[in-house]
Image (cartoon, rainbow, N blue to C red):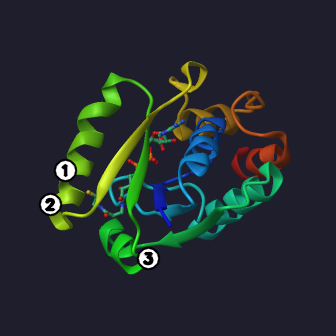
């Protein structure tokens, strides 16, 4: 059984993330979407809130082989504990590459078994980011093109000034 982990801040989850989850879930027997902590980036949603939004997404989209979890330690420790095979990351544009390459190399240095697989984002999501969604919602803009309708209200209410 091939187990993949898709880690990220998911602060909050967007259509771009969901597209990666959907494709990765078809490539592996099981996919864990892992709400992780990027210590260099202050979050707007608590880990619990981010996890709940993802759980609702997984239920609505009918992703039967996808589990949502959170971890506030090193990704590689979680990877080893769950005996995972692969780390999945989405690549939006060339600007993502250097940072992603560095993370993949570091994780592999920490554990030689940790392979990272990159999925190229769908063109329409290459410009999308959680920060952009947060900024638009905070100032009352329309984010309905960027997050699914079933979690739209919760995100808007939580972020509106
Ligand atoms: N569609 C839309 N947006 C996407 C996307 C996609 N397919 N893929 C990434 N993004 C956006 C995210 O929304 C995020 O936007 P933001 O910066 O505005 O919040 C940005 O791209 C970065 O992606 P994200 O997946 O959140 O990465 P991150 O850099 O915040 O997280 C972790 C990286 C959490 C995986 C990393 O810090 C980690 O592994 N932390 C655990 C501790 C650890 O092990 N550290 C050592 C790592 S070598």
Q: CA distance from mark 1 to mark 2?
A: 6 Å
Residue 16 left/right relative to 102: right
Q: Residue furthest top?
A: 123
Q: Which residue corresponds to the image point at 73% horizontal and 60% vertical from the top-left?
A: 64
Label 2 CA crowd tier, 10 Å (few <14, some 14–19, many 20+): few
Q: Where does residue 85 sit, x and y in percent of width and height?
A: 38, 63
Disc 2 CB within 8 Å of nearest ligand 1 atom: no
Residue 158 left/right relative to 128: right
One can see residue 157 in this view:
no
Give 85 or 104, whichever is nearer the viewer.
85
Q: Which residue is mark 1?
A: 105
Label 3 CA crowd tier, 10 Å (few <14, some 14–19, many 20+): few
Could you say which disc has been placed on residue 146 in the image? none
Q: Which residue corresponds to the image point at 53% horizontal and 70% vertical from the top-left?
A: 70
Q: Is residue 72 above or below residue 135?
A: below
Q: Residue furthest bottom?
A: 81
Q: Which residue is mark 3?
A: 82
């Amino acid at each position: 059984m091939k187990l993949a982990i898709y880690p990220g801040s998911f602060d909050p989850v967007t259509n771009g993330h969901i597209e990666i989850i959907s494709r990765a879930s078809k490539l592996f027997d099981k996919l864990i979407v892992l709400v992780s902590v990027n210590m260099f980036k202050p979050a707007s949603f608590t880990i619990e809130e981010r996890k709940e939004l993802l759980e609702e997404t997984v239920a609505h989209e009918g992703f039967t082989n996808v589990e949502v979890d959170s971890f506030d330690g090193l990704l590689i420790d979680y990877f080893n504990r769950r005996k995972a095979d692969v780390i999945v990351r989405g690549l939006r544009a060339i600007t993502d590459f250097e940072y992603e390459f560095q993370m993949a190399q570091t994780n592999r240095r920490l554990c030689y078994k940790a392979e990272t697989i990159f999925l190229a984002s769908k063109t329409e999501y290459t410009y999308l980011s959680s920060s952009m969604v947060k900024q638009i919602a905070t100032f009352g803009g329309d984010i309905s093109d960027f997050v699914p309708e079933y979690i739209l209200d919760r995100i808007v209410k939580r972020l509106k000034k």
